[in-house]
Image (tube, helix red, strand yellow):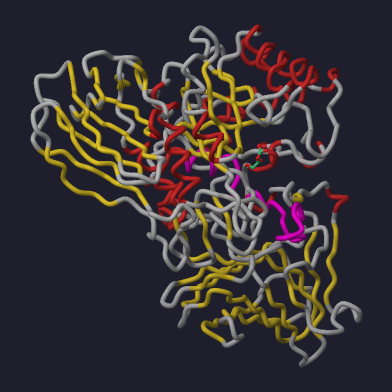
Amino acid sequence: NFTVKAGEVKTTVSPGMWGIFFEDINFSADGGIYAELVKNRSFEFSSPLMGWTIPEGAVSNGQIMVVNRKDDNSSNPRFAKITLPAARPFTLVNEGFRGMGIKAGEQYHFSLYARQQPGSAVKFTVTLLDDAGKTIGTTTVSLDSNNWQLYKTGLTAAATAAKGKLQLTFTGTGVIDVDMISLFPQHTWKERSNGLRADLVQLLADLRPGFLRFPGGCIVEGRELVNRYQWKKTVGDVNEREVIINRWNNEFAHRAAPDYFQSFGLGFFEYFLLAEDIGASPLPILNCGMACQFNSAEVVAINELDPYIQDALDLIEFANGDVNTKWGALRAKMGHPAAFNLKMMGVGNEQWGPQYVERYTLFAKAIKNKYPEIRLVNSLGPGPSGDKFNFLNDTLRKLHADILDEHYYSSPEWFLSNASRYDSYDRKGPKIFAGEYAAHGKGTDGYHKNSWQSALTEAAFMTGLERNADVVEMASYAPLLAHVDGWQWAPDLIWFDNLRSYGTPNYYVQKLYANNKGTVVVPILKDNQVISGQDSVYASTVVDEQSGELVIKLVNASATAKPVAVAVEGVKGLAANGRLTILRSNDLQAINTLDKPLGISPEEKNIAIKGKTVRTEIAPWSFYVVRAKIN
Ligand code: AHR
């Protein structure tokens, strides 16, 4: 039997709870949430014709060549030059990102930049192909300029294809140059051009996240500094954003992706906009002058750190600055004169050692000097324990860090036993951001799965994050998104193919927490002790002062049902009917799939409440959320 002291406010729930972590891993951006269907649209991949099928012999006889105008200092230096001898058409096919998802009845916006040499007369036909190579949409455009010009056309698909392709057939005579060949569905999130995939953004919006951390992850660091994430190269005209290799390119042999690059069509402006759209506070993470320490020992010399620090200062101006400032003006030009209300920023991701402290100290000094209101997030490095963690934890606490970002990818057992992790943390030091976590259970084929066991143990662990809201300000599961045919890391919160997407059981755990976060934490006790695993039951309680409801979260991590009676003290009474949401499965290894996306998903029902005691029996291996109106 449990007691809730509903009149004793332990602490307020941070508005940042519960957030999301976005990284371009597993084809999350290009090939994922970024709705562009053409891969290598500007011929900038390290193998310039990757993603394109070229007719046999066309390259060797010079019918297509990729020209590099690197000397012009262009950030998009390459284009394709195609020669059309009389009456011999030339066909190019783009394979998309593991195919293109094309929907019957949907309009597609095609565009390309082209110019033709004087004396040429060229037309091109744009064709959508289905999985079998059959035409499902087509239209023709004539070129009419000797200067670079944007050509646009629309075409409607007559059928659906999960692994469709785009075919371009050039006819006529002469020589033409083409670049930035692009195909977007008409319906993107908020119908924006250069937009995002609406189904994936909707899944994020449904979480009602408190913050959006971006753009990673290791991707911030790059395997080498030259390929680190540089936000300034990801804003402004999409055509001028420099393509670089993705840090996850070819990372794991089982899903080798030599074609994994970053077009930055989804860049920092779009990330800020996404955060705003879904009501999340933006949390950008910047490179601190160090490449990924899992891959390289490359750091920038301290006397060359200034441009990195300047990037951080300029980002604050880009997000919050007046439209008369240099970077604020760019934001306005891109369509957002209002500030993005940036309040916090991360410096470095999973970096450790004295090299990090040395660099972070210089960042912190410069940022706090100019923008004292910006709170800084420090990564505590990988893993829940060990020397690296201890060194940084001690050092950063001494430096009065604002927020420490802990990452833990551990076993389900670790998550259960760490539900009490923050019960005894220092209340006077920095706040905690549980910035990346996921329970990694053993899948039968050797890969970690989004099993019900992983989700259930995360739910148990999260009772501890919620109970300790005075220390733990923010938390996010990681990674967020994964393409079923192009992933490097599992488990992930949301999976998708080219047409469909689904939330894992872990997604529904996150959603239940975020949609029931309340405004203040109140104590729930068993025999005067906080509940964190006694008899396999984990619990936390919040009050939502806006709706006047008590919210009780209960996790039963055992194989037997547990009858519970929760006596609520400190209230006059409770409404006779409450709402009960249950997430459960009787198979710990059960997962959701594209074909069965709601296999494990919340069920809602009424719960009768007698007097001031909530009684229920929590089913084996289940997560219960009770909402009861306080009288
Ligand atoms: O989430 C995947 C990776 O895990 C992130 O890029 C990194 O921060 C962590 O090691």
| Drawn side of residue 64 relative to residue 42, left or right | right
Q: Residue furthest right?
A: 60
Rendered view: 207 above or below 464: below
Quarter location, residue 517: top left
Residue 564 visible in this rendered orientation of the protein: yes
Residue 253 on the magenta segment: yes
Query: Disc count in the image?
Result: 0
| Drawn side of residue 62 relative to residue 551, left or right | right
- Quadrant in which the C terminus appears: top left
* Image location (x, y in percent) of residue 258: 77, 60
Q: Which residues are magenta?
A: 249-274
* Image location (x, y in percent) of residue 174: 79, 81
Q: Residue furthest bottom?
A: 87
- Quadrant in which the N terminus appears: top left
Residue 333 visible in this rendered orientation of the protein: no
Residue at 26%, 25% (x, y): give it: 2
Residue at 85%, 64% (x, y): give it: 67
Rendered view: 297 above or below 177: above
* Image location (x, y in percent) of residue 133: 61, 85
Residue at 51%, 23% (x, y): give it: 421
Rendered view: 283 above or below 106: above
User: Which is nearer the eye, 31 or 476?
Assistant: 476
Residue 273 on the magenta segment: yes
User: Which is nearer the eye, 89 or 349?
Assistant: 349
- Which corner quadrant of the figure contains ligand 1? top right
| Drawn side of residue 181 relative to residue 629, left or right | right
Residue at 48%, 43% (x, y): give it: 274
* Image location (x, y in percent) of residue 533: 42, 29
Rendered view: 551 above or below 205: above
User: Which is nearer the eye, 182 or 366?
Assistant: 366
